[in-house]
Image: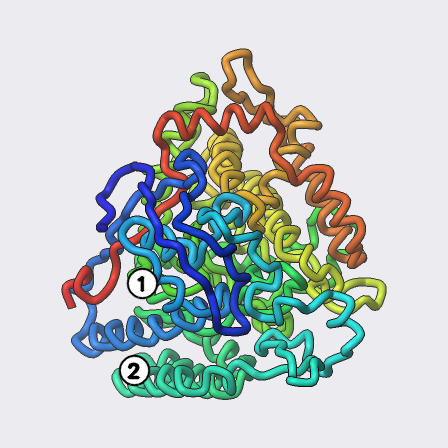
Amino acid sequence: MKFIFGIGMLSICFAFFNCKKEPTTPNIVDGQKQDIVTLDSLKSYATVRLETDLNHLSDKEKAMIVIFIEASQIMDELFWYEAYGDKEELLSKVSGATRNYVEINYGPWDRLDNMNPFIKGFGPKPLGANFYPLDMTIEEFEKANLPDGKNQYNFVRRNKDGTLYTIPYHVHFKDQISKAAGLLRKAATFAEDEGLKIYLETRANALETDQYFESDIAWMNMKTNRLDFVIGPIETYEDQLFGYKAAHEAYVLVKDMEWSKKLEKFAKFLPELQRNLPVADQFKTESPGTDSDLNAYDVVYYAGDCNAGGKTIAINLPNDERVQLEKGTRRLQLKNAMRAKFDKIMVPIADVLIDKSQRQHVRFDAFFANVMFHEVAHGLGIKNTVNGKGTVREALKEQQSHLEEGKADILGLYMVNQLLQKGELEGKKEDFMVTFLAGIFRSVRFGASAHGSANMICFNYFEERGAFKRTNDGTYIVDFAKMESAMNGLSELILTLQGNGDYEGVKKLTEQKGSISSELQKDLDKLKSAGIPDDIIFEQGVKVLGL
């Protein structure tokens, strides 16, 4: 079926099937055709056409977009394997709306409902997705002492004798990677911007070797490009077992030159904001790279990891700590996707859960800034532990992703507050804070994802410190002074946990504050009753763009 623009629960039917190829997902139980879980448990999505004005682009740039989309579709196939296993085996046994819902989630587990299976017969999603053997235990992995076991760009597999070994992505996906790299090199021949040309050539080499440092530097050096293409294995959210393995994805982007110009000035404040962080000096000794920049884009194609379940509306890359310390990061604001979520989700949520006296403070410019500075804030804080435990990523393992998202959330708000005090940002503090709270209500519906857990920790921490109060009619009012105090307290807590590489401390924080209370759940249920979508999906591609 085709999704229409609007809100509606997906009706699902499905045929019983088995998965046979190894390694893939656990077999479902034998038996006759079964029903899915109740429709009430499924998430709703509003459909958005990913379009933008391409009239200012040259014919060569338009040709590049077509090539980028073709390469993105390869990343989509690779992510299917990483997230689930045998895509065709699964899709051949489902049809209609069932197939659509499986495709949204890249498997039979609902990404906005704590990865619960929405097809009966499937158990929980393997924490290691398809990056590791399904029967591998944490203890077995650690005892194996694999030289490249923690490498982001390989699979762990089992030999016939039962021992574990690793295989690099570029070897396992040899044919697909060769084709994708060829497409990047072809696109480079059309590139009129020298920085983009160098990036595409080095990124093609990176895909074929799983060595991404040079291409990350080339990407950071791009300044005048009107097109951008993020492609490769990037985020480690899909690996819930250790948080080691990166998953493939792609974004095709058209820069909004006017909006990007407006954002240029904020990157220069990063060193000062780092020095002023509300935490002990030992946790802010690192200096963010000064080449960091901010840009606004319209995204015209999503594929792979970023297209699964809840959709990304801003990007902060590269993730390589070496690049971040040398060059900083680039923050890409996906303006058209952001606007769609604000109009279709944020505003309706505010109308239900924000007190009438403060609803006027929920504004798109505040939402845009909060999201933007969330991405900027990834570059603040500390990347290497202060006590010899290695990088924060290594020390915190699977606890790293959600804590890092929580850091970015709270330091993003901190940055907004600092820039408002300096007179460098337009707007009212009240707008940013109330919009921030409305944003929490939007994100906690992502379940136990990194962003969902991060927002629940923030919500519960803020609630304990009186940053907002719940009225008798179930709406929420922000106490602006207490929210500022809570913001500083949570910033200090998260930065300290990261700097100390305190795995047990993060785990305890998540267990205590990472869950939705029964009272909040009742309020969130009002959003479902009001027919507010949980997220968005896209009509996208060459035909949608008229190419």
- Regarding residue 248, the answer to whether it shows in the image is no
Residue 486 higher or lower than 358, as above or below:
below
- Residue placed furthest toward the right: 387
Q: In the image, is 273 to the left or to the right of 438?
A: right
x then y, percent, for residue 382: 70, 60
Residue 201 occupies quadrant: bottom left
* Location of residue 291 with respect to 314 vertically, above or below: below
Amino acid type indicated by mark 1: Tyr
Color scheme of the displayed model: rainbow
Regarding residue 68, the answer to whether it shows in the image is yes
The answer to which of marks 1 and 2 sits earlier in the sequence is 2
Q: Residues within 10 Å of mark 1 (few under 14, many from 20)?
A: many
Q: In the depicted view, which residue is nearer to us: 126 or 234?
A: 126
- The answer to whether residue 496 is above or below residue 527 is below
Mark 1 vs mark 2, CA separation in Å: 16 Å
Looking at the rendering, in which quadrant would you find the C terminus?
A: bottom left
**At 19% from the left edge and 62% from the top edge, which residue is drawn?**
545
Residue 187 numbered mark, or none: 2
* Dot 1: element: strand
Q: How many marks?
A: 2
Q: How far from the left and from the top, in percent, is residue 44? A: 37, 40
Q: Dot 2: within a 10 Å radius of its alpha carbon, few (fewer than 14), some, or many (20 or more) residues?
A: many
Q: Is residue 490 above or below residue 483?
A: below
Residue shown at 59% from the left, 59% from the top: 126
For the point 65% across and 28% down, the residue is 463
Q: Which residue is mark 1?
A: 301
Q: Position of residue 138 (x, y in %)?
A: 73, 65
Tell me which corner region of the image, top left, top right, bottom left or bottom right, holds residue 128: bottom right
Percent of width and height locating residue 328: 57, 67
Residue drawn at point x = 79 percent, y = 49 percent:
505
Question: What amino acid does circle 2 point to?
Answer: Ala
Query: In the shown orientation, is residue 400 left or right of residue 249?
Result: right
